């Protein structure tokens, strides 16, 4: 009896992990989908703003160098999916309904990621219980970036299923067998442009795996046709928005403080376990693990390179984390076969590492979102501004010169938005402020909304209070644009300013 209990011990521990992880992920879904927060992690309003614009105007992008100077740096796929969910469920026209649709699109994408990880591991003949744990752990490490209204989770879901399609191709290599992977990667690129960075890797792997020269030529021709069609189907001004919105310069100090150091603090345990598994896979000639091992290396290098870009964050390593979890889970059975009597000891050690990692993620990722207060969707200041323009018909656009997500409240009237993207682009020289001045002088932009302290302390740099990532460029942009407006009304902490050139409403 005692021997049976001892043999069943590891399974009981694993089942306990399954229960804990499933409960945590269910709680993440519930908290996110029922939240009345306007910005759980500070970057949701852009995606919601463009989902609204798509629903109300029928298009996503405009010329970033012409009025209204609205820049959307991401691909079009996520807003279309969110809009499709919004229409399918008949959620109404309130701002809260657009938030729900966008967050639901993200949460469904997280589920697709977890299922995709499980499908890859089952394809690699990993046991069902370990597959479930690895899939749930993937959903756990995605919080909060994967659950909120932004394209990360949709992009990663398409990327993971592209990897699954590539594993199927390896069973019976053929020129047409690579096309599903390429199509999914292109879709991933149109969800978030990082997906395009994996296309060269797929092409190299395909040419390496295809033995016959005829197959290689056919693959290159088919791939060229697919890429050309996908480029031709891109929405108007998509490439211009991407070029202007993502060109924010390089800042190594920023990367060390906000990308590389958080990576080591948050994911050092994963890196420590991944490295031995990587060495075992490469040195042990375990060919079935080569794709996942190489993808992990590539994603780690790619995240490190992209992290140098100003404004980057820890989510640039989400791809690496997912590939690392797949590699570790796929390597564990081979490692466990080398243990005999010490299997229980090894499982206890692995359990301690897993518990420690979960605790680190809860403290660094989950706690700030679940505990800290955040602005509500029905922000009274922004609702008042929205009502002002609804009850006082007037012409002209409204420039967003505050970090308050104003665009989501005035989706068809907003100009120079979002301020974090347009301001960075203007400071880096990718958006000519002379063109914005011309639109103000001509009366195209008639209003601006900013914060009270910024409106009154234009010349006093020390009194500006900006988000930590905006201080290098926000003050010069405000000094350049705000003097052309005069104060008209105050709504709490926000100030509505009017362009004297435009007629009074």
Image: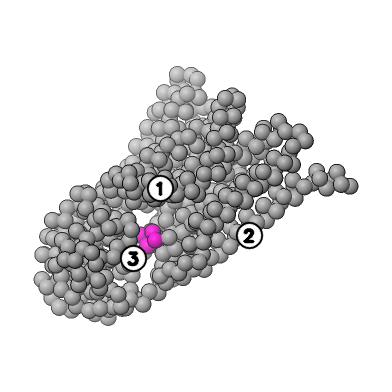
Q: How far, Cα to Cα, is label 2 from label 1?
A: 29 Å
| Furthest residue in direction front, as rendered | 462
Q: Position of residue 3 (x, y in %)?
A: 85, 43
| Furthest residue in direction bottom, as rendered | 391
Q: Is there any visible trace of residue 56 in the rendered image?
A: no
Please indicate whether residue 88 sits to the left or right of residue 238 in the image.
right
Q: The C terminus lies in which quarter of the figure? A: bottom left
Please indicate whether residue 61 sits to the left or right of residue 286 in the image.
left
Residue span colored magenta: 42-47
Q: Which residue: 75% across, 50% down? A: 12
Q: Secondary structure at mark 3?
A: loop
Sequence order check, earlier mark of 2 and 1: 2
Mark number, residue 483: none
Q: Nearer the viewer, residue 186 or 497?
A: 497
Residue of label 2: 23
Residue of label 3: 405
Q: How far, Cα to Cα, is label 3 from label 2?
A: 32 Å
Mark number, residue 259: 1
Whether 306 is drawn above or below 384: the answer is: above
């Amino acid at each position: 009896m005692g021997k049976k209990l001892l043999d069943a011990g590891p399974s009981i521990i694993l089942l306990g992990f399954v229960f804990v992880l499933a409960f945590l992920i269910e709680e993440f879904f519930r908290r996110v989908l029922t939240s009345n927060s306007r910005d759980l992690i500070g970057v949701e309003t852009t995606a919601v703003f463009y989902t609204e614009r798509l629903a109300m105007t029928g298009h996503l992008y405009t010329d970033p160098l012409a009025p209204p100077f609205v820049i959307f740096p991401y691909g079009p796929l996520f807003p279309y999916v969110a809009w499709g969910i919004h229409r399918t469920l008949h959620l109404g026209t309130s701002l809260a309904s657009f938030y729900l649709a966008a967050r639901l699109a993200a949460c469904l994408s997280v589920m697709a990621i977890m299922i995709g990880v499980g499908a890859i591991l089952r394809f690699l003949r990993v046991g069902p219980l370990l597959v479930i744990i690895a899939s749930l752990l993937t959903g756990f490490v995605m919080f909060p970036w994967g659950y909120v209204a932004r394209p990360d989770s949709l992009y990663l879901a398409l990327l993971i299923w592209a990897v699954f399609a590539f594993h199927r191709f390896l069973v019976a290599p053929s020129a047409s067998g690579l096309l599903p992977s390429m199509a999914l990667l292109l879709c991933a690129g149109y969800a978030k442009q990082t997906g395009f960075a994996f296309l060269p890797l797929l092409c190299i792997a395909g040419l390496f795996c295809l033995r016959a020269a005829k197959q290689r030529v056919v693959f290159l021709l088919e791939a060229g046709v697919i890429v050309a069609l996908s480029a031709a189907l891109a929405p108007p001004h998509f490439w211009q928005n991407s070029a202007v919105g993502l060109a924010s310069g390089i800042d190594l100090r920023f990367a060390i403080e906000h990308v590389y150091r958080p990576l080591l603090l948050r994911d050092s345990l994963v890196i420590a376990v991944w490295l031995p598994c990587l060495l075992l896979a490469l040195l042990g000639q375990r060919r079935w693990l080569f794709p996942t091992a190489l993808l992990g290396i590539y994603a780690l290098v790619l995240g490190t390179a992209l992290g140098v870009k100003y404004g980057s964050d820890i989510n640039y390593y989400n791809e690496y984390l997912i590939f690392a979890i797949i590699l570790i889970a796929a390597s564990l059975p081979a490692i466990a076969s080398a243990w005999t009597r010490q299997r229980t000891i090894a499982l206890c050690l692995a359990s301690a590492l897993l518990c420690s990692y979960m605790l680190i993620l809860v403290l660094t990722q989950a706690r700030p979102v679940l505990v800290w207060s955040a602005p509500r969707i029905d922000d009274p200041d922004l609702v008042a501004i929205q009502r002002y323009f609804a009850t006082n018909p007037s012409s002209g656009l409204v420039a967003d010169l505050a970090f308050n997500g104003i665009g989501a409240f005035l989706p068809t009237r907003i100009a120079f938005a979002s301020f974090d993207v347009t301001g960075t682009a203007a400071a880096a020289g990718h958006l000519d402020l002379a063109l914005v001045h011309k639109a103000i002088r001509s009366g195209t932009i008639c209003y601006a909304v900013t914060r009270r302290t910024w409106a009154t302390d234009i010349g006093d740099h020390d009194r500006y209070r900006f988000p930590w990532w905006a201080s290098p460029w926000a003050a010069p942009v405000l000094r350049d644009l705000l003097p052309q407006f005069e104060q008209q009304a105050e709504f709490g902490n926000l100030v509505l300013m009017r362009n004297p050139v435009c007629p009074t409403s």
